[in-house]
């Protein structure tokens, strides 16, 4: 492991010129007469290409670089991350992981709304500006250990909250189960439900039928030692997180 090194995004001008040349030269086909009802249409693809031609990358690059970014060597990967420090030295720490096919950038608007936290937004190995693992496989357990090392060994925090979604949802669970002494709690929007046979035998069913007859997942609370997890049925509101985590009592 290494000490974190400052990092700034800069895409060379020639790369941007090459992209614009290829977009301008795109030869788009019309819709097939037997095109299925789902899928991309020729009109949508044309609008998508036009939006890329008009996109101001330098403005976006500047906005991204307004968030302090770093690189650190962990395991055998170079891990990229954003570290937003609260003005409060004793603020709680929150690790915010992204899903697939997303990147760290999708989480920055959310992270900006949490000034009462020290927020860490990493790029998972192989995503955005993090390198893949140079040897061995990308597994959930391995990524969980990488994320834990980032928070504790690289940044020096003893305890933290963690948020995961999509491919990082189970990484979220593994962090709490493997390091209950460090993980104060998890914020989850993608619940992992048991298989049908396990659900039938469980004394705490995770699904219920609404009055309209549809089936939906329900929020639930689980405890593992000192770890408490709340599984909400919708995206957590930053104001809710601040009240629950930062309020006394």
Image (cartoon, rainbow, N blue to C red):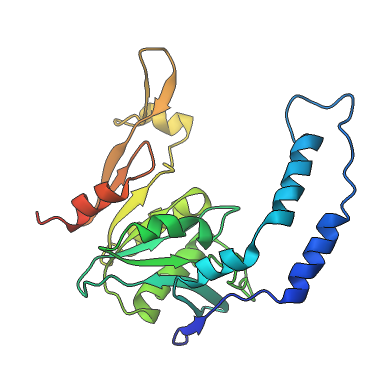
Q: Nearer the viewer, residue 70 or 87?
A: 87
Residue 145 visible within the image:
no
From this view, report whether residue 158 is shown above or below residue 174: below
Spot occupied by residue 152 in the image (x, y as percentages of width and height): 34, 75
Q: How many marks?
A: 0
Residue 121, quarter of picture: bottom left
Residue 28, quarter of picture: top right
Residue 115, quarter of picture: bottom left
Spot occupied by residue 56 in the image (x, y as percentages of width and height): 64, 61
Q: Nearer the viewer, residue 102 or 1?
A: 102
In the picture provided, is 25 more to the left or to the right than 103? Answer: right
Residue at the spot 40% in from the left edge and 72% down from the top edge: 83
Residue at the spot 78% in from the left edge and 75% down from the top edge: 14
In the picture provided, is 139 more to the left or to the right than 180? Answer: right
Residue at the spot 23% in from the left edge and 54% down from the top edge: 242
Q: Residue furthest left?
A: 249
From this view, report whether residue 148 is shown above or below residue 221: below
Residue at the spot 37% in from the left edge and 17% down from the top edge: 210
In the picture provided, is 33 more to the left or to the right than 65? Answer: right
Q: Residue furthest top?
A: 212
For the C terminus, the quadrant is: bottom left
In the picture provided, is 115 more to the left or to the right than 139? Answer: left
Residue 247 visible within the image:
yes
From this view, report whether residue 172 is shown above or below residue 219: below
Spot occupied by residue 247 in the image (x, y as percentages of width and height): 14, 55
Spot occupied by residue 72 in the image (x, y as percentages of width and height): 49, 81
């Amino acid at each position: 492991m290494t000490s974190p090194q400052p990092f700034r995004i800069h895409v060379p001008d020639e790369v941007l010129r090459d992209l614009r040349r290829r977009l301008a030269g795109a030869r788009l086909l019309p819709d097939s007469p037997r095109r299925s009802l789902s899928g991309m249409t020729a009109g949508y693809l044309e609008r998508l290409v036009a939006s890329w031609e008009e996109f101001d990358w330098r403005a976006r690059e500047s906005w991204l670089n307004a968030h302090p970014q770093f690189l650190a060597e962990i395991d055998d990967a170079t891990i990229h991350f954003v570290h937003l420090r609260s003005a409060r030295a004793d603020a709680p720490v929150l690790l915010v992981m992204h899903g697939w096919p997303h990147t760290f950038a999708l989480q920055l608007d959310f992270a900006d709304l949490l000034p009462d936290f020290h927020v860490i937004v990493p790029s998972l190995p192989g995503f955005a500006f993090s390198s893949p693992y140079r040897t061995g496989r990308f597994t959930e357990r391995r990524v969980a250990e990488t994320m834990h090392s980032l928070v504790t060994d690289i940044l020096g925090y003893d305890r933290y909250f963690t948020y995961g979604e999509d491919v990082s949802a189970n990484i979220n669970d593994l962090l709490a189960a493997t390091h209950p002494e460090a993980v104060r709690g998890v914020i989850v929007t993608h619940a992992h439900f048991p298989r049908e046979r396990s659900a039938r035998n469980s004394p705490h069913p995770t699904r219920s039928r609404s009055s309209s007859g549809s089936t939906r997942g329900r929020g639930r609370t689980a405890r593992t030692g000192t770890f408490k997890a709340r599984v909400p049925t919708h995206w957590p509101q930053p104001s809710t997180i601040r009240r629950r985590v930062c309020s006394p009592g």
